[in-house]
Image: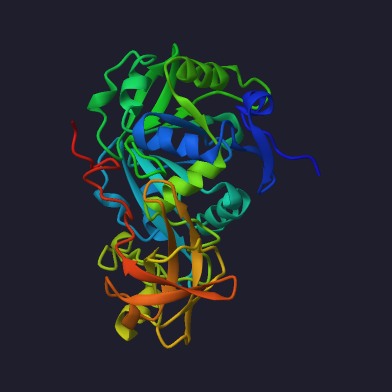
């Protein structure tokens, strides 16, 4: 089956190492994961995120519908504000995590994972039947580019007419970039400051707008980055990857996503009873960050053992942290092992390698790296 192409595919095919990523032809790297990771942590990296899902929810009951289908409180949003949330099944399992932006009480933009594009839209449609809301999947008609890093604002400003420094974190704005009208949300998936740029009215057949902005960003000093650096930066930031760290078998309370669940918001939302029940009973497992104290790289699926070498959990995401020079992992373990400093083993190639539980959001010192870093 032919791979789906994004709006930036022409650039990837010429400059990148293209692989099959969930049915999309995407670059895993250009000049190397280490180089690209460093660019995001120290300068400005750009990622093609056009494979992600984008849906407009519009109508007199758009807000009411979204409050029903997501766990966070949409009513708290101001116009041009955004929030991170999850959609759950009635069982409490996570359908997907997403960001939604409010333009008015009757108009919202939802952004969700590429791997769940079809599933999520079907889920939204299924749950919208009792609401006066229109859903429009515009994933193929809107290009999407992430601009990330401590120099992201400076680089993007070079090709933007408006003052982008005024856009608040998790806010979204109408901007003019490379002469085109776009939307830009101040967020991302790397832990760094930056923007997700939505290139409007840009079809896969005529992707020139997105390609122009991409090439202008490269000309302004941005480093093109592939999936490898996207994964290594998000893991260092302790951010969840759907299909690894969260899925339909995981309750948001287990995943450390309690802050996205507003059990006291008015009205019912899908999964509320199951989440309340788990809150009342207590979780049986919880997601923790693990930093290796001995040499070894933890990977998805590796077993986690206590100090008596009893199996207690499993790694969901893992790898070598280029910033820290150590192996790091996210893993589910029983709550009694979640305390910071708890020692445990990860079984790597039949060897028990020692690690300890650390704060995983983020793994790095956020006064030195990430969007909270102390400005010099």
Residue drawn at point x = 54 percent, y = 75 percent: 351
In the rendered image, which quarter contains the C terminus? top left
Q: Nearer the viewer, residue 64 or 94?
A: 94
- In the image, what residue occupies the spot 65% across and 20% down? 206
Is residue 327 depicted above or below 121 in this figure? below
Hey, which residue is sitting farthest front in the picture?
Answer: 295
Asked whether residue 48 appears in the rendered view, the answer is: yes
194 shown above or below 155: below
**Colour mapping:** rainbow
Q: How many marks?
A: 0
Q: Position of residue 44 (x, y in %)?
A: 39, 29
Asked if residue 10 is positioned above or below residue 285 in the image, the reply reads above
Which residue reaches farthest right? 1
| Between 185 and 126, the one nearer to me in the picture | 185
Q: Determine if residue 135 is in view.
A: no
The quadrant of the picture occupied by the N terminus is top right
Give percent across and percent down for residue 186. Answer: 33, 35
Residue 114 placement, left or right of 367:
right
**Residue nearest the observer in this picture, 77 or 238:** 238
Quadrant of the rendered image containing residue 354: bottom left
Q: Position of residue 299 (x, y in %)?
A: 54, 63
Q: Position of residue 227 (x, y in %)?
A: 55, 42
Left or right of 351 in this view: 190:
left
């Amino acid at each position: 089956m032919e791979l789906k192409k994004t709006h930036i595919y022409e650039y990837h095919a010429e400059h990148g190492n293209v692989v099959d990523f969930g049915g999309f032809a995407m670059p895993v790297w250009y000049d190397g994961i280490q180089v690209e990771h460093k660019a995001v942590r120290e300068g400005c990296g750009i990622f093609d995120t056009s494979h992600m899902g984008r849906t407009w929810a519009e109508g007199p009951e758009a807000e009411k519908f979204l409050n029903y289908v997501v766990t966070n409180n949409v009513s708290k949003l101001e116009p041009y504000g955004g929030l991170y949330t999850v959609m759950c099944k009635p069982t409490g399992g996570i359908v997907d995590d997403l960001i939604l932006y409010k333009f008015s009480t009757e108009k919202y933009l939802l952004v969700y994972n590429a791997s769940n594009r079809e599933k999520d839209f079907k889920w939204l449609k299924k749950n919208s039947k009792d609401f006066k809301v229109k859903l429009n999947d515009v994933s193929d008609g809107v290009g999407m580019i992430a601009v990330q890093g401590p120099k992201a604002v400076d680089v993007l400003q070079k090709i933007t007419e408006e003052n982008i420094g005024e856009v608040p974190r998790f806010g979204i704005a109408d901007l003019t970039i490379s002469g085109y009208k776009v939307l830009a949300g101040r967020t991302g998936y790397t832990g760094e400051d930056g923007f997700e740029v939505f290139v409007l009215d840009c079809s896969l057949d005529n992707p020139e707008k997105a390609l122009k902005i991409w090439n202008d960003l490269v000309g302004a000093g941005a480093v093109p980055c592939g999936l490898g650096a996207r994964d290594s930066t998000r893991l260092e930031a302790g951010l969840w990857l759907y299909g690894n760290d969260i899925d339909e078998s995981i309750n948001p309370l287990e995943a450390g996503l309690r802050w996205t669940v507003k059990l006291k918001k008015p009205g019912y939302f899908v999964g509320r009873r199951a989440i309340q029940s788990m809150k009342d009973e207590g979780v049986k497992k919880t997601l923790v960050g693990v930093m290796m104290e001995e040499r070894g790289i933890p990977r998805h699926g590796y077993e986690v053992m206590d100090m008596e070498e009893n199996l207690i959990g499993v790694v969901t995401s893992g790898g070598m942290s280029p910033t820290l020079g150590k192996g790091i992992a996210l893993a589910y373990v029983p709550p009694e092992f979640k305390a910071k400093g708890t020692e445990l083993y990860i079984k790597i190639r039949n060897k028990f390698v020692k690690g300890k539980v650390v704060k995983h959001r983020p793994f790095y010192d956020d006064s030195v790296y990430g969007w909270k870093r102390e400005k010099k």
